[in-house]
Image (tube, rainbow, N blue to C red):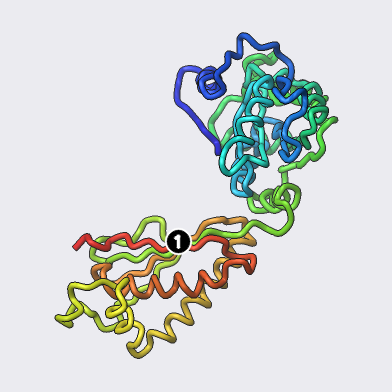
Amino acid sequence: MIERHQGTNPVEDDTRRIEQQCGTSVSDRPRGGPRPSKSGGRLNPQVEVVIVTGLSGAGRGTAAKVLEDLGWYVTDNLPPELIGRLIELGAATEPPIRRLALVMDVRSRFFTGDLSAVTEQLRAQGVATRVLFLEASDDVLVKRYGFARRRHPLQSESADGTLVAGIAAERVRLAAVRAAADLVIDTTELSIHQLHRKLEEAYGGGAPAALQLTIQSFGFKHGVPLDADMVLDVRFLPNPHWIPELREHTGREGVVSEYVLSRPGADDYLRTAHHLIDLTTSGYRQEGKRYMTVAVGCTGGRHRSVAIAEALGEVTGADIGEGVVDVVRVVHRDLGRE
């Protein structure tokens, strides 16, 4: 999880938070590497660590989000002396943290530009550790900074205060880190989806990560869900609202769902919708997307949309384990809102 806090100095805010969680003080610790574990020098050998670093503007933030989607626990600019403690704390959580991604950049006062001490100590303590370095050409970095309207972190320290000089200074500062990296990715010609695929191949642990599917019923009179990727309109089905003995029931109850699903066209519609969802989720996964929301709407969101959403949840839930969808959630947004 990437945690970001507002404050006058984000790094100091993060440090105070970490100190509170770990029950320790950074100022009381020696600098330069992970603190030895309480178990006699070896940390949890089942933990994997990837250190994400590289040039500013080359895609560290995007890489962090991708790793988080792939199941890595992501943290920004953790002081090196607290890495060991975080691994220990992660091993004690439920479920335990097995894959930890540490994002480090030159803006952190804890980043010295030399990660060798950190990686050597982690490996000596039994932790599988890799370094990912992201870079891009000067031209592309200049364009990205121009688009974002941000200053380079080393721009003010460069000789003439220009963006190009700041980028050059950062390349020099990180030359040793790049040389020692296990994987260097040049993002100059990469789209976000192409970078996603490269990271998935390197850190996904095998098959491409699956997708979380949310099926949400709603009533059109309350508005279409803003986060819907696909909208299905089931108002063509007869409305149970006009049947007195069904009016007070909902689509989650058998008496209503049996009525809705037995109407002419309902079965064909379910099969077609399931096929469309299957095609779309497969394409989403190939494009690096990890979440999809299908909104199913009727007039009020009480009968037809609820019954169809429940039925779609059952048929798509049967797809779990086939490598495309790993979680199916059924949500009824407007149920009880009438």
Report the residue that reaches farthest toward the bottom: 264
Residue in the picture at 72% in, 52% down: 205
In the figure, 323 relative to 75: above or below?
below
**Residue 13: image location, x then y, percent:** 50, 20
Depth check: 111 or 54 in front? 111
Residue in the picture at 36% in, 83% down: 261
Report the residue that reaches farthest toward the front: 39
Q: Quadrant of the N terminus?
A: top right
In the figure, 94 relative to 308: above or below?
above
**Residue 201: image location, x then y, percent:** 74, 52
Picture quadrant of residue 281:
bottom right
Q: Answer with left or right where residue 194 lies relative to residue 257.
A: right
Disc 1: which residue: 329
Q: Answer with left or right where residue 47 lies relative to residue 181.
A: left
Residue 330 in view (yes/no): yes
Picture quadrant of residue 300:
bottom left
Depth check: 189 or 29 in front? 29
Residue in the picture at 51% in, 20% down: 20
Depth check: 338 or 37 in front? 37
Helix, strand or loop at label 1? It is strand
Q: Answer with left or right where residue 289 lies relative to residue 315.
A: right
Q: Quadrant of the C terminus?
A: bottom left
Picture quadrant of residue 228:
bottom left
**Residue 131: image location, x then y, percent:** 77, 35
Report the residue that reaches farthest toward the right: 179
